[in-house]
Amino acid sequence: MAEAIVKTENLTYEYIRRDAEGNPEGVTTAVDHLSLDIAPGSFVAVVGRNGSGKSTFARHLNALLVPEESAVWIDGMDTRDSDKHLDIRMAAGMVFQNPDNQIIGQVVEEDVAFGPENMGVPTEEIRLRVDEALELLKLTDKRLDSPNRLSGGQKQRVSIAGVLAMRPRCIILDEPTAMLDPQGRAEVIRTAHRLNREEGITVILITHHMEEAVDADCIYVLDKGKIAMQGTPREVFARVEELKALRLSVPQVTYLAWLLRRRGVALPEAVLTVEELVNALVV
Amino acid sequence: MRGITIGQYYQADSPLHLLDPRVKLLCTLAYIIILFFADNPYAYGLATIFAFAMVMISTVPVRMILRGMRAVLFLALITVLFNLFLTPGDVLVEFWIFTITRQGAQTAAMMALRLFLLVLASSVMTLTTTPNKLTDALERGMRPLKIFRVPVHEIAMMMSIALRFIPILSEETEKIMNAQMARGAAFDEGNVLKRAKSLIPLLVPLFVSSFRRAGDLALAMEARCYHGGKGRTRLHPLRYATRDVIAYLVFAAFLAGMIVVIRLF
């Protein structure tokens, strides 16, 4: 295996809870001794319910948060080295939850250009990168539009294009679908898979929708800042009871298959798609 | 409110639209300054002809330009009245407690025209330049102020972020208003004091959400390598073309004409 693109070692992040007057009440450990390696070119889903520490974890991957004692390496760079922060952010781009709060430009193509502009890329090269990113995300016909005229899914694609124009090796999507309608959600997840497959970009998808994790290479389930489960979707979704204990849902079809299996219907351990279930039942 | 256009940009392909925003900004500024030195009808005549020529070239419908004028109508009226009645000099007309002097009438006419041309010039500029380009021009134009530690890049960035968020915040205002109205809030009842008070439940959530947005945006900007104006390149850098040089020359000719007319008469 090639060197890990993302590597964390005992990553721990604590913050102090305060009451209304600002007096410390106690310490919350958002991320608790998390160690993981993510291989270049893989599609990794990090799932967990609200407060499981998944967003705090995501922010460490982009050097927006820097660990004090433990360490995070992005593409071999230690995030504690503040001279490397720009390089780290170029290597690992981040897409946030709210599409409106991360689009800076007043015109789609100008927003996509924002990252490369900050990196000091020459004008001709910015043009190339912007056109390429817009083409990849099928936004070329929208390039001169105001972002306010786009749908949620389209806005999120603009955000992804903006990250892509920075030519990162890895894209972190921090609950990119939380504010979208089902159509927009499908649009964004499809795009993430296409970039992973066709461009070889490592994708780390942070989400609480288990359905979105089905096609990942590997799933990490976080709970209280710790890795509660990890493995391929098939391995993770086979443990329906444990997931339920963590108050995470499994895809509907997986749940149905699990119920049937409990009733004695001969089915494989984890069923991920409707097609699989149909095939297993019909044969 | 979706897709609202900020400012009053009018999309067209006139030569004025194509000009570098710095040319338009600088020339408008110079035009306004020279207006304040104009003190005879000939100078005003020349300035008016030039302004109307620009309106013709801009291909912006006159009706759009007049709309901008309405805002200063009241101000113009007051100025005219004060100048008309309160300037001492050779009496033209006298009735009851009012006297109109020749000088008064002249100043009033010139003041009104000055105000009118002032607004006309800036309207033509904003109608032919997108807010984006204007911000760019301001950033470049104010660059010399960096010597005095004026944060030029930051000001321009704030302006363009403000422009980006005005439609979003106005949409949000509408949402909050609807939510409060659904719970029985009345925004258009009662006297001034009561109305002002009724805005509190609107403004508080709006402020809170604005701050949250600002925090999110700062994070997103940082994640995309934003670190101030240092070493930043542009997708659309401002570059002077031949037509911009021609525009400067035309304007310089007009300016020279104005100075000659002001000196001569």
Image (cartoon, rainbow, N blue to C red):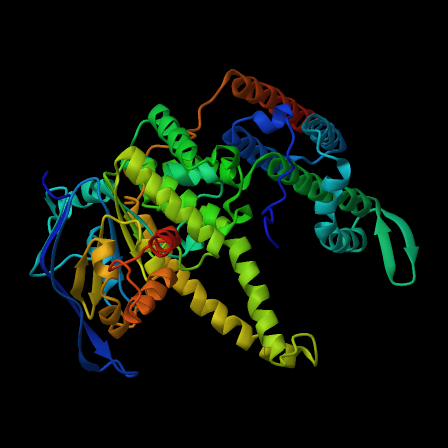
User: Which of the 4 image quadrants contains residue B236?
Assistant: top left
Residue B148 sits above or below residue B242 on the image:
below
Front position in the image: B239 or B72? B239
Q: Is residue B162 visible?
A: no
Residue A249 sits above or below residue B214 on the image:
below
Measured as percent of width and height from the top left, residue A171 is found at: 27, 45
Front position in the image: B248 or B156? B156
Measured as percent of width and height from the top left, residue A261 is found at: 29, 66
Q: Is residue A165 visible?
A: yes
User: Which of the 4 image quadrants contains residue B12?
Assistant: top right
Front position in the image: A33 or B110? A33
Front position in the image: A88 or A205? A205
Measured as percent of width and height from the top left, residue A174 is found at: 31, 55
Question: Residue at 26% across / 58% down in the picture?
Answer: A268
Left-right relation of A158 to B41: left
Measured as percent of width and height from the top left, residue B221 is found at: 33, 49
Question: Residue at 29% across / 40% down in the picture?
Answer: A196
Left-right relation of B100 to A112: right
